[in-house]
């Protein structure tokens, strides 16, 4: 097992090493500390946090339904929910654009009611990130619920507990370890989202240009800045995973 494990680790580590070798470490602070870079980082963190919150509010009920539902067609529903995992992000962005754009059937309604179009706004960034990140949360939670079974919920129901009480006092505590893991995965996926964002929200500085889009923009004019920002994004992602993910694992082992 050691040889394939080493090859797998090398496949992940060596590209990062390649960035380090290519970068000019002496210029790294000056390349990162530009107004556009900090604006992009700030926007990425804010939108990733908002999209993760949306994933929790929408994904937790969806995962419970998928894990506990017994109606016909639940397998098809699960496949549709997990579609963003295999769908190219650019295709997802196009789908959102033709749904919520000026000529989309839902976009026309929103524009008529609010007077503001959804695409090419910060809201569009959050929607795109939520679209690609929510399946990670749903997969984590549904797997945890199926593994735990529903015997505790059935016992609580037979003792007279209302459905909301069962969910709050039984189901939700069972979900907490997996919820921590799913939140971290969703946040990390939202932080690195590129394809759906640039297609649906564009790349407008201080409005929709997140850090991945800033890397892409800089790669066309200054490759050194692009490499430096890539390293910054890697560091932020590692910090998120290293700080939060082990705690969720430990919770799941207890």
Image (cartoon, helix red, strand yellow):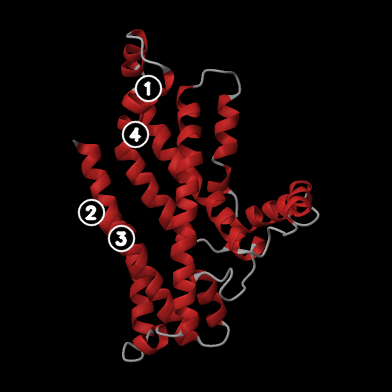
Residue 71's spot in the image, x, y percent? 57, 18
Of callouts 4 and 3, the N-terminal one? 3
Residue 130's spot in the image, x, y percent? 53, 51
Nearer the observer, 157 or 8: 157
**In the depicted structure, whether residue 209 falls above or below residue 156:** below
Of callouts 4 and 1, the N-terminal one? 1
Real-space Cα separation, disc 4 to disc 3, in angstroms: 30 Å
- Disc 2 + disc 4, Cβ < 8 Å: no
Mark drawn on residue 2:
2
Q: Which of marks 3 and 2 is in front?
A: 3
Residue 123's spot in the image, x, y percent? 60, 58
Real-space Cα separation, disc 1 to disc 3, in angstroms: 45 Å
Q: Please indicate, yes or no, whether residue 187 appears anywhere in the rendered image.
A: yes
**In the depicted structure, whether residue 131 falls above or below residue 237:** above
Real-space Cα separation, disc 4 to disc 1, in angstroms: 15 Å
Q: In this view, does 49 lie to the left or right of 119?
A: left
Residue 23's spot in the image, x, y percent? 37, 85
Are there few (<14), some (14-19), or many (20+) residues within 10 Å of tag 2?
few
Are there few (<14), some (14-19), or many (20+) residues within 10 Å of tag 3?
few
Of callouts 1 and 3, the N-terminal one? 3
Q: Nearer the viewer, mark 2 or mark 4?
A: 4
Are there few (<14), some (14-19), or many (20+) residues within 10 Å of tag 1?
some
Q: Which of marks 4 and 1 is in front?
A: 1
Disc 2 is placed on an element classified as helix
Mark drawn on residue 175:
4
């Amino acid at each position: 097992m050691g040889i394939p494990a080493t090859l797998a680790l090398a496949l992940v580590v060596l590209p990062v090493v390649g960035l380090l070798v290519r970068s000019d470490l002496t210029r790294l602070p000056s390349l990162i500390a530009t107004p556009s870079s900090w604006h992009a980082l700030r926007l990425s963190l804010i939108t990733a946090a908002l999209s993760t919150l949306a994933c929790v509010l929408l994904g937790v009920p969806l995962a419970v339904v998928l894990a506990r539902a017994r109606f016909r067609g639940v397998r098809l529903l699960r496949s549709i929910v997990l579609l963003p995992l295999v769908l190219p992000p650019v295709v997802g962005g196009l789908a959102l654009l033709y749904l919520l754009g000026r000529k989309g059937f839902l976009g026309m309604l929103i524009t008529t009611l609010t007077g503001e179009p959804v695409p090419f706004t910060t809201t569009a960034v959050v929607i795109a990130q939520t679209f690609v990140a929510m399946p990670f949360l749903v997969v984590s939670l549904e797997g945890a619920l199926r593994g735990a079974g529903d015997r505790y919920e059935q016992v609580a129901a037979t003792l007279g507990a209302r459905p909301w009480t069962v969910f709050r006092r039984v189901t939700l505590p069972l979900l907490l370890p997996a919820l921590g893991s799913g939140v971290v995965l969703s946040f990390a996926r939202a932080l690195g989202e590129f394809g759906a964002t640039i297609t649906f929200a564009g790349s407008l500085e201080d409005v929709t240009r997140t850090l991945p889009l800033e890397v892409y923009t800089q790669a066309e004019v200054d490759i050194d800045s692009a490499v430096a920002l890539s390293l910054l994004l890697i560091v932020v992602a590692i910090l998120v995973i290293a700080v939060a993910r082990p705690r969720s694992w430990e919770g799941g082992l207890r």
